[in-house]
């Protein structure tokens, strides 16, 4: 995709090509291309339309129905914020009194559009000309062109003095190769610029990779980790007036279905756990129930806070599995009932599962070097029953816990 192809897609002929591509996308790509050519669509326009149709299909899980009208790139789609996460962030900014926002490194515009939907005036800047043009087109398609202005330029040179707040999502992929960048100093804009924003605009939010080292969190900032349906999707630093607590784990449950706000608008169910991130959970024996904390809780270093809520303990101080005598409903962990605790032995485990006619197992692990798929093959399972296996350590010893799920509600 280039600027000329994007311009062609935005013409009436391009719109017709996109509509035709939507009808044939998802199957054999050669057959789809042949179908468009037979309909009289030029080869270059057909290829661009098919690429957009396929990207829009992939984007539906991240953006919902609005993906059908967006312009996308593969790299931009991978880094773009999920709509549920962006909407929640925008609502928090709006609740903090933000009315104007600079979006530095806006990408395809997912966060800018969310802020616009929340009624915030957004001034977005993007270094890549094609991506900037797509972001502007996406704002127009969403009916937000009067609230979201996109310019192509250097985020480090953008004047942030007139706005209430700044949002920055530094690029974490190398231009041209698309390879992930794990060193924050190699982000674009660079890390020193990103962390210096809070000194210029007190209300600053920075989107960062979920694997961010806690040592890099600026003093006084709130670090938040966000998961969606159990998948850790991002972390964010809330600086200045926006920082409310040292650490926050936010768990979004799209699969639970939307909730209605007082205004009648829909929102994704959201649960939050907060704390200092430095408290250590107590250690004790394996008990009847095991809690596997959500990855946002683990990355936010809030396992101790969750343990306090559940009256639970760790069996090993370095492994984030919690054990308790009661099963309590919580959105922050999956609960399993432990039926057997075995020092790890393939022979003993195979015999136990054969005796119980277990033919299906879900395997999870922390603190174990075993490969789940190899173990599954080595167990040679047969039977109609199912079980959960947890590979871990207890007091330093390799251990396998045989479990069964606890129904929702305890």
Image (spheres, helix red, strand yellow):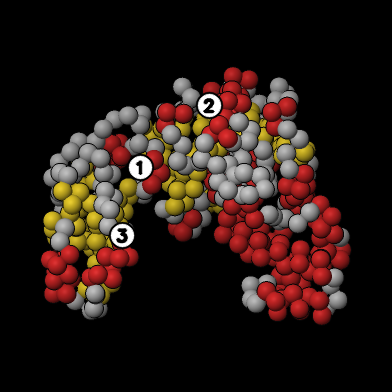
> Quick one: label 2 or label 1, which is nearer the N terminus?
2
Does residue 386 lie above or below 268 as drawn? below
> Quick one: label 3 or label 1, which is nearer the N terminus?
1
Q: Which residue is mark 2?
A: 239
Q: Nearer the viewer, residue 150 or 396?
A: 396
Camera-near label (3 vs 2) is: 3
Q: 10 Å neighbourhood of mark 3: few (<14), some, or many (≥20)? A: few
Does residue 159 lie above or below 351 as drawn? above
Kindly state the secondary structure of the residue where label 1 is placed: helix
Drawn side of residue 292 relative to residue 286, left or right:
right
Quarter assignment of residue 40 = bottom right
Q: Nearer the viewer, residue 12 or 400?
A: 400
Q: Quadrant of the N terminus?
A: bottom right
Q: Which residue is mark 3?
A: 371
Camera-near label (2 vs 1) is: 1
- The spot of residue 288 in percent (x, y) is 16, 53
Residue occupying the point 28% across, 36% down:
304
Camera-near label (3 vs 1) is: 3
Q: Nearer the viewer, residue 387 or 175?
A: 175
Q: Is residue 406 visible?
A: no
Q: Nearer the viewer, residue 103 or 54?
A: 54
Q: CA distance from mark 2 to mark 1?
A: 22 Å
Q: Which residue is mark 1?
A: 298
Q: Are marks 3 and 2 in contact (CB under 8 Å)?
A: no
Residue occupying the point 26% across, 48% down:
367
Kindly state the secondary structure of the residue where label 2 is placed: strand
Q: Is residue 54 visible?
A: yes
Q: 10 Å neighbourhood of mark 2: few (<14), some, or many (≥20)? A: many
Residue occupying the point 46% across, 37% down:
212
- The spot of residue 54 in percent (x, y) is 66, 65
Q: CA distance from mark 3 to mark 2?
A: 40 Å
């Amino acid at each position: 995709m280039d600027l000329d192809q994007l311009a062609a897609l935005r013409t009436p002929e391009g719109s017709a090509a996109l509509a035709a591509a939507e009808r044939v996308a998802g199957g054999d790509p050669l057959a789809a291309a042949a179908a468009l050519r037979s309909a009289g669509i030029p080869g270059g326009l057909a290829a661009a339309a098919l690429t957009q149709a396929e990207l829009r299909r992939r984007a539906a899980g991240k953006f919902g129905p609005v993906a059908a009208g967006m312009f996308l790139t593969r790299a931009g789609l991978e880094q773009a914020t999920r709509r549920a996460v962006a909407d929640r962030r925008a609502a928090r900014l709006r609740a903090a009194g933000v009315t104007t926002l600079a979006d530095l490194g806006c990408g395809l515009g997912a966060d800018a559009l969310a802020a616009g939907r929340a009624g915030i005036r957004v001034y977005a800047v993007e270094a890549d000309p094609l991506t900037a043009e797509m972001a502007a087109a996406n704002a127009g398609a969403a009916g937000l062109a009067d609230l979201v202005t996109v310019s192509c330029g250097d985020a480090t040179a953008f004047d942030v003095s007139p706005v209430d707040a700044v949002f920055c999502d530094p690029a974490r992929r190398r231009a041209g190769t698309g390879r992930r960048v794990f060193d924050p100093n190699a982000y674009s804009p660079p890390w020193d610029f990103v962390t210096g924003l809070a000194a210029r605009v007190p209300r600053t939010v920075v989107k960062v990779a979920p694997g961010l080292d806690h040592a890099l969190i600026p003093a006084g900032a709130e670090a938040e980790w966000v998961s969606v349906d159990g998948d850790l999707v991002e972390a964010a630093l809330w600086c200045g007036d926006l920082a409310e607590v040292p650490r926050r784990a936010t768990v979004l449950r799209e699969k639970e279905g939307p909730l209605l706000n007082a205004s009648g608008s829909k929102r994704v169910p959201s649960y939050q756990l907060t704390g200092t991130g430095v408290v250590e959970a107590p250690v004790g024996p394996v008990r009847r129930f095991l809690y596997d904390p959500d990855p946002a809780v683990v990355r936010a270093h809030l396992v101790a806070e969750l343990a306090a809520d559940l009256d639970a303990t760790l069996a090993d101080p370095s492994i984030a599995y919690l054990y308790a005598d009661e099963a309590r409903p919580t959105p922050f962990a999956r609960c399993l009932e432990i039926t057997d605790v075995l020092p790890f032995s393939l022979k003993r485990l195979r015999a136990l599962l054969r005796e119980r006619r277990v033919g299906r197992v879900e395997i999870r692990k922390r603190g174990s070097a075993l490969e789940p798929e190899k173990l599954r093959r080595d167990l040679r399972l047969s039977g109609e029953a199912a079980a959960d296996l947890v590979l871990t350590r207890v007091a330093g010893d390799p251990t396998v816990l045989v479990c069964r799920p606890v129904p929702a509600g305890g």
